[in-house]
Image: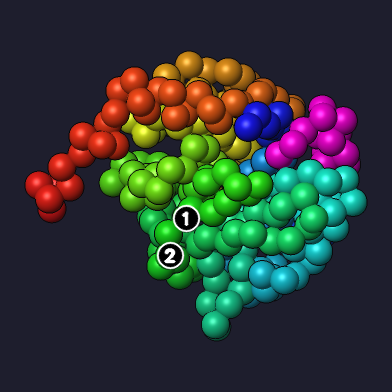
Amino acid sequence: MSYNITIIQSDVAFGDPLQNREAMQHKLLQAKDQNADIIVLPELWTTGYDLSRFDEIAEPIDGPTHQLLGQFAEKYGIMIVGGSVAEKRDGGYYNTMIAYDRAGERQFHYSKVHRFRLMNEEKYLLAGERKASFQLEGTYMAGLICYDIRFPEWVRTNMLHDEKILFVVAEWPLPRVDHWRSLLISRAIENQCFVVACNRVGSDPNNQFGGHSLIIDPWGNVIAEGDETEQLVSGGVDVSQVEAIRQQIPIFRDRRPELYE
C-alpha cells in the first residue's frame, strides 16, 4: 500500500480559532491539489499556545474543527491527520490529536501524554491516559504530539503491533530544531517505520517556531523536508518497505522485554 502524503506547514494566529479555521480551509484545498491521500496538520493549529485562554477558545471533540475536517475529508475522499486541537472535556482541557478516514469519520483521538513544562502545559492541560495507535485503510499507524518524541519508550510502546507510519504533530521551537530532526530520524530507524512529522512556523508572544516538517523512511533517509516558511511538504510512502526492512533486521523479534523493566 502506497500513500501520497502532504503536510501543511503553517503559521498559527495566536488564540484566534475563527481566523485559523478560515485560513486552514484554503490550505486544505491547496493540499488536495497535490493529489494527497493523507493531509497532515500541526499541533494546536486552531489556538496556538494561548493556554491561559483555553476556557474561552477550547472546544469539545465534536466541535467546529471536527465539523470542518470531517466534512472536508468526506467531500474530497482524503484522509486527514488533523494535527491537534485544544479539547474541552470533563471540566478540563487536553491537547488532542484527531484523524479522519476518507468518509469523514473520525477514526482516532489521542490526548498528549507528556506535558511540556517549558511551555507551562502542566499548569493548564490534563495529561492523556491512552495509547496512540489507530488504523486507516487497514494500515496500522500511530500518532504522537511534539514532546512525546523525547520518550523513546513511549514511542516504542505505540509501535509494537505492526504500526508502519508514525505521525508527529508539533509546535517545536526554532532554537531546538536540530533536536527535532535528530530525534525523528532516530525514531524512524529504531522503530523501522515511516515518520511523518508536521511542525508549525512563525511565532507567538513567547516563541519562534522551527518548521522543518519531515517525511522519513524506515532507514532514516529524509524523503521530503520543509524550511522555516509556510509551505506544503509532500512525499510518497510505500508501507511494504517496512515489512521488508523488519525481516532484514528483525529487531522486534529480537527484543527481550523481560529485561527492560
- Front-most of 206 and 94? 94
- Residue 104 image position (x, y, % from top left): 78, 57
- SS type, badge 1: loop
Kind of residue indicated by mark 2: Arg
Kind of residue indicated by mark 1: Ala
Q: Quadrant of the N terminus?
A: top right
User: Which residue in the rendered view is the most extreme toward the bottom?
Assistant: 91
Report whether residue 25 is seen: no
Question: Magenta span has 56?
Answer: no
Q: CA distance from mark 1 to mark 2?
A: 7 Å
- SS type, badge 2: loop
User: In percent of the image, x 47 and y 28: which residue is there?
Assistant: 242
Residue at the spot of label 2: 130
Q: Is residue 139 above or below residue 66?
A: above
Q: Is residue 65 left or right of residue 129?
A: right
Residue at the spot of label 1: 132
Task: Determine contact: label 1, label 2, CB under 8 Å.
Answer: yes
Q: Is residue 12 left or right of residue 49?
A: right
In this picture, which residue range is highlighted in magenta?
A: 21-38
How would you rate the neighbour count of disc 2 (Cα within 10 Å): few for under 14, some for 14-19, many for 20 or more?
A: few
Q: Is residue 26 above or below residue 101?
A: above
User: In percent of the image, x 62 and y 63: which residue is there?
Assistant: 86
